Structures are given as C-alpha cells and as structure tokens.
Image (tube, grey):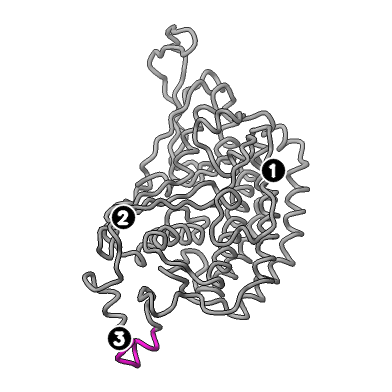
C-alpha cells in the first residue's frame, strides 16, 4: 500500500488548503479487499478524510454477454457474478426469463429452488462473517465459518455435480431433480449446522476486541439507507424492515414461516448480528421445504416446448434429437414475446434484479442486472469518513462487496 504525498486539497468543511494530507492506494491486491477493488483513501494522519472506490479490475462484460448467449447458456455467466452464492444468481436469472415467457414452474421445482437459495444465503453469510473475523484478527473464527461451507458444497455436488459454479437452473425447471441421497445430505446438514453457528457466536459475538472494533463504526442511519437504495442485511441492520421474500413473495415463500431479522444500530456489529440471525432463519425455511417437498416433476410439461430433452433421449431416439435441434437453433427455439420485464429476488446481499427485454429471438435484446454490491460499495465513502485507517477493513467487510457484480 504505497503512500504518496497528495497535492494541496481543499478541506470539505473549511475550504482551506491542507497540504499535509496523504493519499493511500488500498488495493486492488490488498488481501483485506477479498477481491480486486481499489480504494483511494485521503488520510489526515491515520484518520480517513475521504475515500474513492475505483472499480473495473474484474470486468467480464456480463451484460453484453446476455445479448449473445441464449436464455439457458447465460446461466453460466450468472455463476460468475456473485461467485460466493452462484445458486441464488441462477434462480434470479431464470425467474426473470420465466416471467418474460409466462412460464409457471412445478411445485417441486419451486421448493428445490427455495432450498438452494437459502443454502446459498448461508454460505454467503458464512464467508462474509468469517472474513470479518479474519480481517479484525480472529483467524479461528474464519476456520469455524469455512467448515460448514464445505458441507454445503457437498450438497450442491450431490444436486448437480458441481461444487461452486453450479448452473443448476434451466428455463422452466432445473438441470436435475434432487435424489434421495441429496435430500438425506440436506437433512444431515440441518442437524449439524446449529453447533458451528453457536460456536461462531461465542467466538466473535461476545468478543470484546471485535465489538470494540465494530460497534459505532460505519453507522448508516435508516433515512440514509432508504435514500441510498440499500437492501438486504445492510438495510435491515439500519432498521429498514424490507425483505422481498415476505413483501413480494416468489417461489412460494408465502408458504414458509420465518422472521425478517432487523437491527437499529446500523453499524458494523449490527450488520454482523443480522447475518448471524438470518442464517438461523434460513435453516428454518430449508427444514420446512425439505419436510414438505412436493412430489412430481421439476420441469414444465412437454407442451411448453422449452425444456431440452434428456441426453439419453437425444442419443437414442429420433424424436429427442429433433426436439433438441429445434430448441437450440436460433430461428426455431421457443417463442419469446417482444416485451420487457423486471424480476427481483432477495439475494444474500440484498435485492438482485434482472431487467430482460425480449425481441422474439432466443437471445435477450437487453439483459440488465441490478446487483446489490454495486449499490453498497457507493456507501463506503459515506461510512468511512472520520474513522481510522484500521476501520477500513471492518466497514468494507460488513458490506460484503463482491467485485464481479460491480464491473459490467
């Protein structure tokens, strides 16, 4: 992190030259950013006077790719947006596409999507809280958080064969149905996860050093959270009681009993506690979904003509081969209306929305993403001003910014 003398700069408060300010480049390779984000900090000694986030180091062009890949192929790109919880991205994308096409997926598919979304919420929060502990000096807490993430990866592997970049959803359904083994692994996970969560809470939630470093740091008021379009745990930690799973239900979330976890302090510790509470609520939702998992197919019927046939049918029957050919050909796929839709889900970090414009072809005319991290990184200068340099990692960690969502 090189320090260089800054040019004489006008004080925001007194409009007087302050030639003693320093400029520090925090990142983009700094380990505490956890990704490729550069923060240009203006320092008065060790106190942060101002900060400027600088993005663009992980540009993947994922919105432009939406105009060149069809509605099923693009799911592989959504895996690389918030790569910590890719299943949640898969579901959000195909919910938007199905809204455009007017498709209603079967009940079993809805419940399985709820299960993978809540598992993704847990794995995302585990990484966020483990990294918060690591950045503030609690290495043991990081290890305690990462062990349960491996259990979730095992479940994902049983569901779709991939542990990380899953690409599990399809237009009108899922890649595979959940096998009895996968359901048993989910039940086993539900029995094992409460103990590590309790251990994490004891390790960090009651740790005097951690609380001193997070309480009263990076305070975001309720009014500012609303004015700056915050969502998810960041908004709920400031007293904004908004959760799309309750306020605008999708996938049958209205069938489940769960609480919306909120706090009022709006500081880094409040964001930590909200995420801890949300993991316990996700466990409740998963347990209800598994115990009430409907029978039946996971894909829409053949009359919809949007689901690719199974590989066995493609390789062994002429009907399967013809159906596959017609669905993948650009001028013979399923019918797409020339309309536009916006569909949002309650992703682990907040409102994840996709705006999709159809033009009658098998590819979107426009695929726009509303990622929560892009909104929340813009908060960072507001939250860090007046704090010490050592508070940068605490504030940034509590926002859980994922750089792959930032750069288009």
Q: Which residue is mark 2?
A: 339
Observer-nearest residue: 129 or 177?
177
Magenta residues (range): 311-322
In the image, residue 133 sits, relative to residue 47, either above or below, namely below
Using the numbered discs, state the Cα–Cα distance from disc 3 to disc 2 in whole angstroms: 30 Å
As for residue 319 lying within the magenta part, the answer is: yes
Q: Which residue is mark 1?
A: 273
Using the numbered discs, state the Cα–Cα distance from disc 2 to disc 1 in whole angstroms: 42 Å
Magenta stretch: helix, strand or loop mostly: helix
- In the picture, measured across the screen, residue 218 lies left or right of residue 202, that is left
**Foreground mark, 1 or 3?**
3
Which numbered dot is residue 321?
A: 3
Disc 2 vs disc 1: Cβ atoms closer than 8 Å?
no
- In the picture, measured across the screen, residue 181 lies left or right of residue 5, that is right
Using the numbered discs, state the Cα–Cα distance from disc 1 to disc 3 in whole angstroms: 53 Å
What residue do we see at 70% from left, 49% from top?
A: 277
**Foreground mark, 3 or 2?**
2
Mark closest to the chain's N terminus, 1 or 3: 1
Please tell me in which quadrant of the rendered image residue 29 appears.
Answer: top left
Observer-nearest residue: 58 or 1?
58
In the image, residue 109 sits, relative to residue 260, either above or below, namely below
Residue found farthest to the left: 331
**Foreground mark, 2 or 1?**
2
Mark closest to the chain's N terminus, 3 or 2: 3
Observer-nearest residue: 332 or 212?
332
Q: Residues within 10 Å of mark 2 (few under 14, many from 20)?
A: few
Observer-nearest residue: 29 or 306?
306
Q: Residues within 10 Å of mark 1 (few under 14, many from 20)?
A: some
Q: Secondary structure at mark 1?
A: helix
In the image, residue 37 sits, relative to residue 278, either above or below, namely above
Q: Secondary structure at mark 3?
A: helix
């Amino acid at each position: 992190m090189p320090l260089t003398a800054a040019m004489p700069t006008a004080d925001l408060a007194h409009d007087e030259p302050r030639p003693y300010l320093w400029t520090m480049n925090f990142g983009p390779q700094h380990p505490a950013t956890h990704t490729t984000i550069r923060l240009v900090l203006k320092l008065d000694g060790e106190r942060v006077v101002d900060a400027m986030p600088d993005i663009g180091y992980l540009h993947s062009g994922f919105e432009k790719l939406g105009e060149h890949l069809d509605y099923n192929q693009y799911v592989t790109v959504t895996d690389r947006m918030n790569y910590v919880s890719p299943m949640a991205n898969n579901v959000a994308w195909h919910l938007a596409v199905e809204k455009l096409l007017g498709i209603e997926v079967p009940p079993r598919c809805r419940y399985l999507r709820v299960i993978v979304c809540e598992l993704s919420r847990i794995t995302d929060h585990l990484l966020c809280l483990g990294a918060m502990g690591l950045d503030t000096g609690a290495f043991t807490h990081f290890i305690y958080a990462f062990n349960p993430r491996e259990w979730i990866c095992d479940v994902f592997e049983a569901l779709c064969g991939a542990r990380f970049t899953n690409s599990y959803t399809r237009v009108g359904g899922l890649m595979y149905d959940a096998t009895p083994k996968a359901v048993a692994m989910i039940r086993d996970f539900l029995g094992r996860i409460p103990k590590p969560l309790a251990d994490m809470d004891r390790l960090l939630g009651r740790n005097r050093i951690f609380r001193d470093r997070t309480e009263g740091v990076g305070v975001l008021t309720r009014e500012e959270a609303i004015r700056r379009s915050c969502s998810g745990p960041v908004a709920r930690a400031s007293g904004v009681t908004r959760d799309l799973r309750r306020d605008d239900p999708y996938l049958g979330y209205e069938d489940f009993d769960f609480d919306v976890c909120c706090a009022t302090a709006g500081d880094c510790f409040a964001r930590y506690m909200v995420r801890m509470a949300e993991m316990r609520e996700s466990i409740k939702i998963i347990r209800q979904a598994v115990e009430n998992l409907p029978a039946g197919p996971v894909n829409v019927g053949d009359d919809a003509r949007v689901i690719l046939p199974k590989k066995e049918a493609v390789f062994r029957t002429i009907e399967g081969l013809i159906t596959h050919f017609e669905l993948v050909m650009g001028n013979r796929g399923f019918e797409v209306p020339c309309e536009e839709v916006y569909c949002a889900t309650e992703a682990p970090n907040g409102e994840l929305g996709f705006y999709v414009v159809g033009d009658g072809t098998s590819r979107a005319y426009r695929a726009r993403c509303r990622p929560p991290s892009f909104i929340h990184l813009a908060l960072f200068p507001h939250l860090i001003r007046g704090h010490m340099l050592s508070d940068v990692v605490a504030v940034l960690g509590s926002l859980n910014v994922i750089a792959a969502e930032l750069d288009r």
